Image (cartoon, helix red, strand yellow):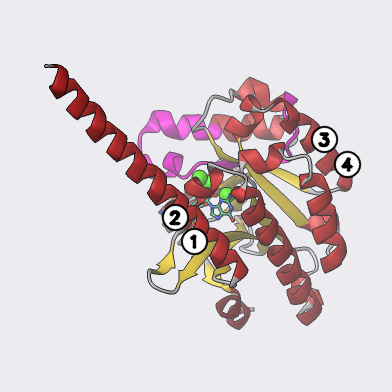
Amino acid sequence: AKSNGRGRAEIFDQALRTELEVRAKLEADIRAGLASDEFELHYQPVMSVADGNLRSYEALIRWRHPLRGMVPPNEFIPAAEESLLICEVGRWVLTHATRQLAEWTRMDPQGHGDVTVAVNISARHLASPSLVDEVRQALEESGLQPRRLVLEITETVLLDEPTADTHLRALRDLGVTVSLDDFGTGYTSIGQLQKLQVDTLKIDQSFLRSDDPATQSLVKLMITAAHAFNLDVVAEGVETQEQLDRLAAIGCELAQGYYLGRPKSAQETEIVV
Ligand code: C2E
Ligand code: CA
Ligand code: CA
Ligand code: CA
C-alpha cells in the first residue's frame, strides 16, 4: 500500500510538473509574440438601437500565431492573467486601440468624431499601480480625447480588489468612460449599481439567448434600473432582428452582436468606413 501511495504521488507530481511546464511555455510564447508583433486587434461595432448609427468599437485581441494560426483570446488571455504578463498585454492593447481610433478620426473626422473605442481591462491590470499612468500616456501619444476611450471591466474585479475602486475613480477623473462587462453573470446586484464607479452596463449575451419570459422580464428590469442610475446600457450578443426589435421595445439604446457586425481586422473595418 505504501509503494502504491508513493506511485500515486509521483503521478500527481508529474502531472503538476507538466501543467506548470505547459503554462510556462505559453507565457514565454506570449512574451515572444508581443516582441515580434504577432497580436492584432479586431473591432466589433456597437450600434444605436434606434437609428443604427455606429457609437463605438470594442477592440478584441487575437494572436496570429506562426504555427497555430489565428488564436482566440480565450486560449491565451486566461494564461496571461495568471501573472503580471496580462499588464503587458493590456498596455499593448491600450496603445494600439487608441492609436487606431485616432487614425480613423484623422481619415474621417465627420464619421468618427464621436465614436469611442472600448478595451477590455483584466482584474490584475486594474489593480496595477501603473494603469492610470499607462492610460494617460496612451491618450497623450495618440492625441485621443479621454471621453473617446472606454474601459471594460468585469464585476468580479470590483468585488475582489480594494484598490480597483481608487483606480476607477482616478480613471474617471481623467475623463475616460468605464463600462461594466458581462453584467448579470456575477454577484453584483441591481441595488449595488448605484455605488459602482461605472458609466455603462453591458448585459451579458447569455440573457439574449433565452426566450424564457422570466429572463425577458429580468433584462427589462436591469435596463430600467440602469437608467434610473443614469447608466447607458449595451446588450451583447444580438444575433437576430427579433432580438433587436425586442431590445428597442424595452428601451435598450445600444447593441452589439453578430447581427450588427462581427469583429473585423482594422483593414476590413476601414473598407466599411
Ligand atoms: P467579451 O469582452 O465579453 O467580448 C465579447 C465576445 O463575444 C467576443 O469574443 C465577441 O467576438 C463575441 N461576440 C460578439 N457578438 C457575438 C454574438 O452575436 N454571438 C456570439 N456567440 N458571440 C459574440 P472574443 O473576441 O472571442 O473574446 C472573448 C473574451 O476574451 C472577451 O469577452 C474578453 O473577456 C476577452 N478578451 C478579448 N480581447 C481582450 C483583451 O484585449 N484584453 C482582455 N483582458 N481580454 C480580452
Ligand atoms: Ca468586453
Ligand atoms: Ca461581455
Ligand atoms: Ca466575457
Measured as percent of width and height from the top left, residue 221 is found at 56, 29
Mark 2 vs mark 4, foreground winner is 2
Q: Secondary structure at mark 3?
A: helix
**Amino acid at circle 3:** Arg
Measured as percent of width and height from the top left, residue 159 is found at 63, 25
For the residues labelled 4 and 3, say whether their Cβ atoms are less than 8 Å apart: yes
Q: Which residues are magenta?
A: 195-220
For marks 3 and 1 on the same chain, the one whose residue lies earlier in the sequence: 1
**In the rendered image, which residue does mark 2 sit on?**
25
For marks 3 and 2 on the same chain, the one whose residue lies earlier in the sequence: 2
For the residues labelled 2 and 1, say whether their Cβ atoms are less than 8 Å apart: yes
Query: Is 172 colored magenta in this rendering?
Result: no
Query: Is 213 colored magenta in this rendering?
Result: yes
**Amino acid at circle 1:** Asp
Crowding near the residue tagged with mark 2, few <14, some 14–19, many ≥20 C-alpha atoms within 10 Å? few
For the residues labelled 4 and 1, the Cα–Cα distance comes to 36 Å
**Amino acid at circle 2:** Lys
**In the rendered image, which residue does mark 1 sit on?**
29
Quarter placement of the C terminus: bottom right
**In the rendered image, which residue does mark 4 sit on?**
173
**In the rendered image, which residue does mark 3 sit on?**
169
For the residues labelled 3 and 2, the Cα–Cα distance comes to 37 Å
Q: Report the residue that reaches farthest toward the front.
A: 3
Q: Secondary structure at mark 4?
A: helix
For the residues labelled 2 and 1, the Cα–Cα distance comes to 6 Å
